């Protein structure tokens, strides 16, 4: 076969064009792969940057919440010092009540035009403490059991729930209530045991037999859980109406007679009270049972029944609820502090600190206290 110069030249040109096409496709493929890799790297870096920024913002929000906690404690300290200074200047050292600055419903602070902090201080002396039912020796405090029964009755709830709670708290496995000890709880799915110790959080109440959601919705605005020594005293100037119904009036009964709801409503309508004498003169209530009166106020606790302070006109345990919003991120903080001492010697001991949102409870107690 013969090949001419012309046909050979055409073959060479066609081969060259084919090679150029392959090279171009290869270059385009490399460029596409490089673009994909670069895009993936950029997207990954962008995600990393957003993640880091988010972590920084959340951390910043958390530290703003801690700063708000310190500010709230400072406000409590200054209020206590102001009362002492007023008394030194010839005035009267007023007790804690709901008209004081610290008791404002919602204190808000702006953060550099990029966020805000909401602070709510609640004195826990306005609620009935469920841990009152357990004595230091692990036995049930019978008088406190009766007080809690009174609260349940006034709320139109089954007063036998008090026995179920007592079984959850006391140290033994002897059943006082109904299906309320470890043997009963072990048959549930999932199984668990009765705590047989003081409650650590109010949410624990959901584990106690009989305390269904509809029961808790009625009860929660009037109760709290605080781990302090002895009985947590109720502040007559701040307590909810139903919490006041746990107090006893003086009768021939060693434990007294539960305060009626109307008497509790009258106490609320006349407050704030300056001192015990002012309360006795204006409350219109019969004398409260001696074992309900706070030691050291002139109305000492009744030593015969081993009772501690059941009511007072001041508060010593406070819950600080904080919501810090910063750059689109939110940090929650719920801190419980106890005031020990007063004036310059006062200490605010942190009993608990949780990164939780307790705002739902704030709305409930606000409605219940009215």
Image (tube, rainbow, N blue to C red):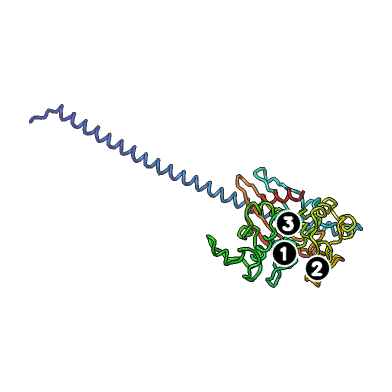
Residue at (50% x, 45% y) in the render: 46
Q: Which mark is residue 153?
A: 3
The picture places residue 142, in percent across and down from the top left corner, at 73, 67
Residue extending furthest toward the right:
90
Tell me: 46 left or right of 369. left
| Residue behind mark 2 | 254
Q: Is residue 10 shown to the viewer in this render?
A: yes
Is 355 rendered above or below residue 1?
below
User: Considering only order in the chain, which callout, 1 or 3, is on the residue closer to the N terminus?
Assistant: 1
Pointers 2 and 3 in contact (CB under 8 A)? Answer: no
Q: CA distance from mark 2 to mark 3?
A: 20 Å
Work out whether residue 152 or residue 340 is closer to the camera in this orientation and state it.
152
Secondary element under disc 3, as helix, strand or loop, is helix
Q: Position of residue 70 (x, y in %)?
A: 71, 56
In the visual, does 307 lie left or right of 91? Answer: left
Which of disc 2 and disc 1 is earlier in sequence? 1
Residue lying at the far left in this picture: please name it.
Answer: 1
CA neighbours of label 3 inside 10 A, class few (<14), some (14 to 19), many (20+): some
**Distance from label 3 to label 1 (Cα)?**
12 Å
Residue 313 percent across, percent down from the top left = 82, 59
Residue 71 seen anywhere in this rendered image of the structure: no
Of residues 325 and 30, the one nearer the viewer is 325
Residue 178: which quarter of the image? bottom right
SS class, disc 2: loop
Of residues 322 and 96, the one nearer the viewer is: 96
| Viewport quadrant of the N terminus | top left
Q: Which residue is mark 1?
A: 145
- Estimate the x, y position of residue 136 in percent, counting from the top left: 70, 71
Of helix, strand and loop, which one carries label 1? Answer: helix
User: Does label 2 or label 3 sit earlier along the sequence?
Assistant: 3
């Amino acid at each position: 076969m013969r090949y001419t110069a012309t046909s050979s030249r055409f073959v060479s040109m066609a081969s060259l064009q084919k090679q150029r096409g392959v090279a171009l496709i290869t270059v385009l493929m490399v460029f596409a792969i490089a673009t994909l890799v670069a895009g993936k790297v950029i997207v990954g870096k962008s995600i990393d940057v957003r993640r880091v920024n988010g972590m920084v913002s959340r951390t910043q929000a958390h530290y703003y919440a801690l700063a708000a906690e310190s500010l709230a404690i400072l406000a409590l300290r200054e209020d206590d010092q102001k009362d002492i200074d007023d008394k030194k200047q010839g005035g009267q050292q007023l007790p804690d009540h709901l008209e004081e600055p610290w008791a404002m419903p919602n204190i808000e602070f702006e953060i550099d035009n990029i966020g805000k902090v909401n602070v709510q201080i609640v004195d826990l002396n306005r609620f009935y403490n469920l841990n009152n039912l357990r004595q230091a020796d692990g036995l049930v405090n019978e008088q406190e059991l009766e007080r809690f029964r009174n609260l349940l009755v006034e709320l139109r709830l089954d007063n036998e729930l008090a026995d179920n709670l007592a079984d959850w708290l006391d140290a033994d496995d002897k059943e006082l209530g109904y299906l309320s000890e470890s043997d009963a709880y072990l048959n549930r799915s999932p199984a668990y045991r009765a705590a047989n110790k003081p409650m650590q959080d109010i949410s624990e109440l959901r584990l106690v037999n009989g305390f269904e959601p509809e029961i808790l919705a009625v009860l929660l605005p009037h109760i709290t859980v605080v781990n302090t020594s002895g009985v947590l005293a109720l502040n007559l100037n701040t307590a909810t109406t139903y919490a006041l119904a746990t107090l006893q009036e003086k009768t021939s009964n060693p434990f007294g007679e539960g305060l009626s709801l109307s008497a509790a409503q009258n106490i609320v309508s006349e407050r704030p009270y300056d001192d015990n004498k002012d309360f006795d003169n204006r409350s219109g209530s019969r004398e409260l049972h001696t074992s309900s009166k706070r030691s050291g106020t002139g109305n000492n606790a009744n030593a015969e029944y081993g009772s501690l302070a059941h009511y007072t006109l001041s508060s010593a345990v406070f819950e600080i609820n904080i919501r810090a919003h910063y750059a689109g991120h939110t940090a929650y903080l719920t801190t419980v502090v106890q005031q020990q001492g007063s004036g310059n010697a006062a200490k605010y001991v942190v009993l608990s600190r949780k990164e939780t949102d307790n705002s739902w409870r704030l709305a409930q107690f606000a409605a219940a206290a009215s």
